[in-house]
Amino acid sequence: MQHPRDILLGAQATAGMLPVCDHYSGVEARMRKSLQLQAEMTQEFGTCVFDVTLDCEDGAPVGGETEHAALVTELALAAPADARVGVRVHPVDHPSFEADIAQIAGRAGGRLSHIMIPKVESVNDVELAEKALLSAYPAGLPLQVLIESPAAVHRAFEIAAHPRVQSLSFGLMDFVSAHAGAIPADGMGIEGQFTHPLVLRAKLEIASAAHASGKVPSHCVVTEFNDVQAMQTAARRAAREFGYTRMWSIHPSQIRPILEAFAPDERQIETAAAILLAAVKADWAPISYAGALHDRASYRHFWHVLERAHGTGRALPSEVMPWF
């Protein structure tokens, strides 16, 4: 029997959605704790519910970039086989960029889920990163890119269309700073980032660009990590109002609120399962469910609901478990 993913997504079918949370850490003790926490939560949920991205850009001390890249490499190599570990390297115009790629991808490429490229301004930056990556690790890896300036937002659709790009992230603080004071500092805060028109426009452009090319839009950080309720509210808005399917975490306390905000609720899961099971019985022809017509257009939506539920560790009806 054909898998629903193949029937509904066709040529756009992938191995699955990315975890909804991407957790960043750059200090050695925190990187080790992040990898340990990932393993513990994978066991708890029965699936890997967040990526760990080891950070060279903000994690490496000035003058210590080479040593930090070596540390990141060793951590990636020592991670469990089922771990999802990525690395944020330095920007393509940084003196340490090529050394980062040569060291980390060259030695640990087979253990990495992705490479994050910060401060991408154009497709040319993506091409430079891809060239360095393939030189160090010919098998290649997905590139995730960080959009951090008004010019990069303007080119987001072109950047997202590059076949090596897997995900677009929004770099809120650099974006605000790039406006030379035209956006007030509270535009970087929990409330301002959801109210200032220029920030809102950037978020929507990035999400739209990602979806236009079938890529994953990843929402920016929330720096107020002690306020769990505010964190969950921000994550819920990112998912439900701005079209993001993934979000950054910078503190372990943010991971579960992100999972909760991005996960479908029990009612949504039950509805999605019932509609898709009815579609199977109808050989994927149109059906009527609860007085409404459904066909392959809505089937695709409900398939994504089930994928998201599985990816966030939610319980699924036994009838659909063979699909996962």
Image (cartoon, rainbow, N blue to C red):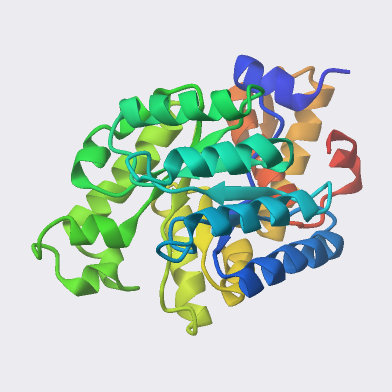
Instruction: Identify which residue is drawn at 62% across, 15% down.
Output: 11
Percent x, y of residue 67: 56, 58
| Position above or below: 78 against 273 | below
Q: Is residue 82 visible?
A: yes
Percent x, y of residue 130: 48, 26
Q: Quadrant of residue 211?
A: top left
Left or right relative to 90: residue 306 = right
Left or right relative to 123: residue 311 = right
Left or right relative to 201: residue 247 = right
Left or right relative to 304: residue 94 = left
Q: Is residue 291 visible?
A: no
Instruction: Identify which residue is drawn at 47% across, 49% down.
Output: 218
| Position above or below: 240 against 231 | above
| Position above or below: 96 against 142 | below
Q: Residue furthest bottom?
A: 226
Viewport quadrant of the C terminus: top right
| Position above or below: 144 against 300 | below
Viewport quadrant of the N terminus: top right
Percent x, y of residue 308: 66, 47
